[in-house]
Image: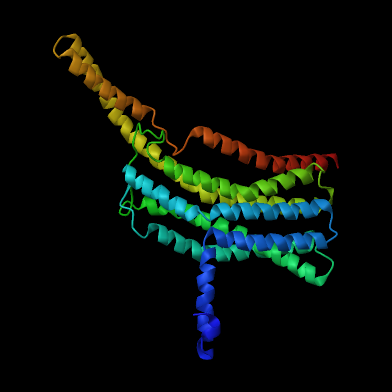
């Protein structure tokens, strides 16, 4: 039934139902794409309407591109985490997981994310008022600041959501009545069976590194004089980079460190089993050499025990490939380098004075 054939008293609910039916198409990632497309169009209009320096406009435009890219990726975070947990369960690495585990994480993130979004968007908007340059007309300036606030809110919302998916994992998994982790030495994934969760938190690390990359790039450009009109933004951007890196540590560093400690603790216990296996292998070899045991079956037992021994000895204590971690650490070091160089430059200037 179309809205034109609905009696007047029921027209309101009918329109709501009709809108809900059509808007259902834009749920999930499609909704983010729609909102961000509208935001990008408004951002383009504001940028064209202002006579701000080119580097300032590029900084704003690049920030919006990072926001769009990050939101598109973050829309899959909860489903990725759910898949990682299910894969650990299928492998027998993670057991006794409550059915409501992912829903509880979503609920906690829903309570935290809007508050963090507002807490981040408000000071970022004030920074643009005091350190940036808004369009000359009141209407364009108001629209510009709304976009800045919206971008800050989206970034804060996503960072808080990812932090909730990370920081709430360790205390939950520490409760042995609800969770049980059992590493699998020699597992084919090369991470004692925990690679799915390691891959997920590396994904979160990449997501939370997006604002760090934007901030680090512009700090480097300002510090080297490539963006001469943005000198006033140097200290605010350094402060924002510190905040962004704190979110990165909370969303990825803390849970990865927890799994590292859990794997390292279980490996220490398994090493005692490895020592026992080495002693058994030595005994079997001596008995076989003395002719007390049949050679072929004994060799098979020795090979089996030796394989188990080596799988324990070689078991990693991080839930991912260490080469991936080195690349990520190198990227973060590159982000911190501009801050260090600026600190050294300031100290040198102070000494010269």
Identify the image quadrant of the C terminus.
top right
Vertical order, 166 against 317 (above or below): below
In the displayed structure image, the side of residue 158 where residue 62 appears, left or right: right
Question: Residue 242, percent across and down?
Answer: 64, 50
Considering every residue shown, the one lying at the far left of the view is 292
Question: Residue 234, percent across and down?
Answer: 76, 50
In the displayed structure image, the side of residue 253 where residue 150 appears, left or right: right
Vertical order, 105 against 182 (above or below): below
Q: How is the image coloured?
A: rainbow
Vertical order, 62 against 188 (above or below): below
Image quadrant assignment for residue 306: top left
Image quadrant assignment for residue 114: bottom right
- Residue 202 can be seen in this image: yes
The residue nearer to you, when weighing 96 against 23, is 23
Q: Residue at x 52, y 54 (%)?
A: 162
Considering every residue shown, the one lying at the far top of the view is 290
The residue nearer to you, when weighing 5 against 352, is 5
Q: Residue at x 26, y 26 (%)?
A: 276
Q: Residue at x 52, y 32 (%)?
A: 323
Question: Residue 164, percent across and down?
Answer: 49, 57
How many numbered marks, from 0 up? 0
Q: Residue at x 77, y 44 (%)?
A: 221
- Residue 124 can be seen in this image: no
Question: Residue 265, percent across and down?
Answer: 37, 39
């Amino acid at each position: 039934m179309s809205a034109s054939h609905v009696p007047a008293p029921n027209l309101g609910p009918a329109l709501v139902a009709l809108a809900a039916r059509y808007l259902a198409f834009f749920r999930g990632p499609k909704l983010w794409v729609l909102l961000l497309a509208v935001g990008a169009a408004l951002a383009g209009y504001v940028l064209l309407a202002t006579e701000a320096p080119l580097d300032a406009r590029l900084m704003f435009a690049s920030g919006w591109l990072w926001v769009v890219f990050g939101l598109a990726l973050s829309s899959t975070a909860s489903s990725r985490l759910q898949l990682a947990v299910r894969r650990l369960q299928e492998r027998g690495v993670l057991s006794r997981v409550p059915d409501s585990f992912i829903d509880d994480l979503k609920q906690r993130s829903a309570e935290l994310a809007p508050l963090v979004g507002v807490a981040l968007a408000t000071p970022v908007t004030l920074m643009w008022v005091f350190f940036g340059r808004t369009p000359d007309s009141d209407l364009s300036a108001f629209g510009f600041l709304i976009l800045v606030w919206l971008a800050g809110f989206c970034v804060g919302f996503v960072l808080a959501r990812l932090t909730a998916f990370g920081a709430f994992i360790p205390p939950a998994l520490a409760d042995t009545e609800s969770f049980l982790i059992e590493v699998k030495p020699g597992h084919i994934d090369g991470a004692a069976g925990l690679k799915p969760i390691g891959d997920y938190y590396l994904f979160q690390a990449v997501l939370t590194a997006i604002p760090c990359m934007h901030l680090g790039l512009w700090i480097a450009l300002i510090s080297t004089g490539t963006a001469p009109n943005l000198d006033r933004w140097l200290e605010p951007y350094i402060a924002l980079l510190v905040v962004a890196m704190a979110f990165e540590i909370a969303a990825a560093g803390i849970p990865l460190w927890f799994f590292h400690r859990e794997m390292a603790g279980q490996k220490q216990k398994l090493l005692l089993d490895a020592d026992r296996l080495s002693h058994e292998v030595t005994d079997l070899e001596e008995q076989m050499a003395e002719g007390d045991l049949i050679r072929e079956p004994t060799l098979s037992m020795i090979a089996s025990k030796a394989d188990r021994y080596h799988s324990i000895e070689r078991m990693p204590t991080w839930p991912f490939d260490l080469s991936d971690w080195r690349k990520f650490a190198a990227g973060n070091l590159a982000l911190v380098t501009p801050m260090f160089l600026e600190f050294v430059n300031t100290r040198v200037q102070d000494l010269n004075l």
